[in-house]
Amino acid sequence: MSDANLAGVMEARATVGGWAGEVAFVAGDRTFTHAEVHDGAARTGSLLADRGVGRGDRVLIALPDGPELVWAFLGAVRLGAVAVPVNPRLTAADHAAAATAAGAVLVVCEAALAERFDGRPVVIGERLGATIAGYPPCAPAAVDAGAPAYAQYTSGTTGAPKAAVHAHGHPLVYADAFAGPAVRLARADVVLSVSKLYFAYGLGNTLFFPLLTGCRAVLHAAHPRPDDVAALVGQHGVTVLFGVPTFFAQLVAAANGPLPSLRVAVSAGEPLTPALAARVRATLGCPVLDGLGSTEVGQTFASNTLDRWEDATVGRSLPPYRVRVVDGSGADVPAGGVGALWVAGPTLPVGYLGGPAPAPGEWLATGDLATLDEDGTVRLQGRSDDIEQVGGISVSPLEVEAVLSRHPAVTEVAVAGVVGPRGGSQLVAFVVGPPRATLDAELLALARAELAPFKVPRRVVHLAALPRTATGKLQRFALRSHPLP
């Protein structure tokens, strides 16, 4: 159908659902109703059109989380253009490269970044609210559900980041698959996402889900420090907190007690160890659900749910998504066997900006190793490039990390094979947490008590923080090259 414009669908849902006059976003001391959000997007669309943006054109958006980013994103989508949000904290070279790779005809960014984009027309984000006041609202362009709406860059854990293009109809699938069935998101909810809008996880949590379900979101532009997030949860009565394991570990370590408004915490990005999951539940006073998604799929495609969750798993695939675990020839692995995780569903990319066309076929290799139980429960076994070879034996670092993370002094832990000064790879545990004299011995004793000898780390190294991508995913390759004495 040609009336499937995502921005128009969201506006129509707000009217039909009766939540147009209710608050959609809180940003500092400013609030914006759903109607105000859609009106601002419609006026932004007129502004972009006046600056030469048309159907199919790419609009690069380099803004912190705030209503201006939402307006710019939906304004481009409303025109039938393609919104391309990127991290505003990238380097000047990375911003210029992103604009070139996207073929952006216009950039919406902060004033401080305006000179970075090779002379492309720029709209200043800080002035957007005042600028669009003089423009009339534009009607949503008539597009099909399969037409390109936005593109987002992958995290780059398996190579150079590439921008996966998603269609107007995809966010409706994300909401119907995950927001409702897994989290029971409803109009009364207040959500806060640690992951920012320029990441796939944050874009769904903070923009798509609130505007499609009628709830409200707290927009927080600054880096998410645990104390700040805890204060926002209390101030705004946040009921659903979306985060990643690294953040939840920091939040638990800094917390002064439960956050009583929370009814559920949602984790993604990396496997949540059972020990950390238990600490999150005990500290925050609510369930924590672990799930799995990707930029290329668009959002979460497998998850634990409020009806059924099990630690050390990412739950089961969420209809209409399907998953398989396969061997090197693409044949299904028997239940309980380790293999490559594949996913199929209606939201695989419709293309890549300036890159390869999507691989033919209905299945996408996620890059994860996993097992699939008889009932469809997915248990991650690490990334395909994360398996460590130590003394000629394959070791899954997740198994070792799950044991070491149970120690109460460990905030985070990652295990990697590191080549020692005499050559040869040895297993090393990199630990974040307050060091003390006996901690290394306690950790190694814990490992010896529960793991086969070849899985026990040879040494423990203490770090202030683990190396991670901008999305919070562990860069294990950086640990492999860590110098050892």
Image (spheres, grey):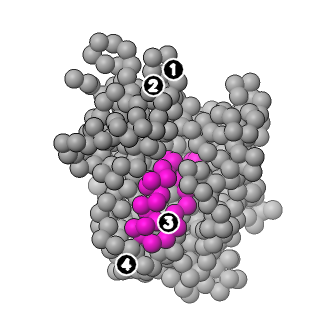
Residues shaded magenta:
268-295
Q: Earlier in the sequence, mark 1 or mark 4?
A: 4
Q: Which label belongs to residue 403? A: none
The amino acid type of the residue labelled 3 equals Ala
Left or right position of 389 against 3: left
- For label 2, the residue is 454
Tell me where residue 214 sits by quadrant.
bottom right
For the residues labelled 3 and 4, the Cα–Cα distance comes to 14 Å
The amino acid type of the residue labelled 2 equals Phe
**SS of the residue under disc 4:** helix
Tell me where residue 74 sits by quadrant.
bottom right
Residue 138 in view, yes or no: no
The answer to whether the residues at label 2 and label 3 have Cβ atoms under 8 Å apart is no
**Coordinates of residue 231 in the picture (x, y in percent):** 33, 74
Instruction: Choose mark 1 or mark 2, whichever is in front.
Output: 2
- Who's the residue at 34% across and 57% down the image? 250
- Who's the residue at 60% across and 73% down the image? 185
The answer to whether the residues at label 1 and label 2 have Cβ atoms under 8 Å apart is yes
Instruction: Choose mark 4 or mark 2, whichever is in front.
Output: 2
**Coordinates of residue 102 in the picture (x, y in percent):** 52, 43
For the residues labelled 1 and 2, the Cα–Cα distance comes to 8 Å
- Hey, which residue is sitting farthest top in the picture? 422
- For label 3, the residue is 265
- For label 4, the residue is 234
- For label 1, the residue is 393
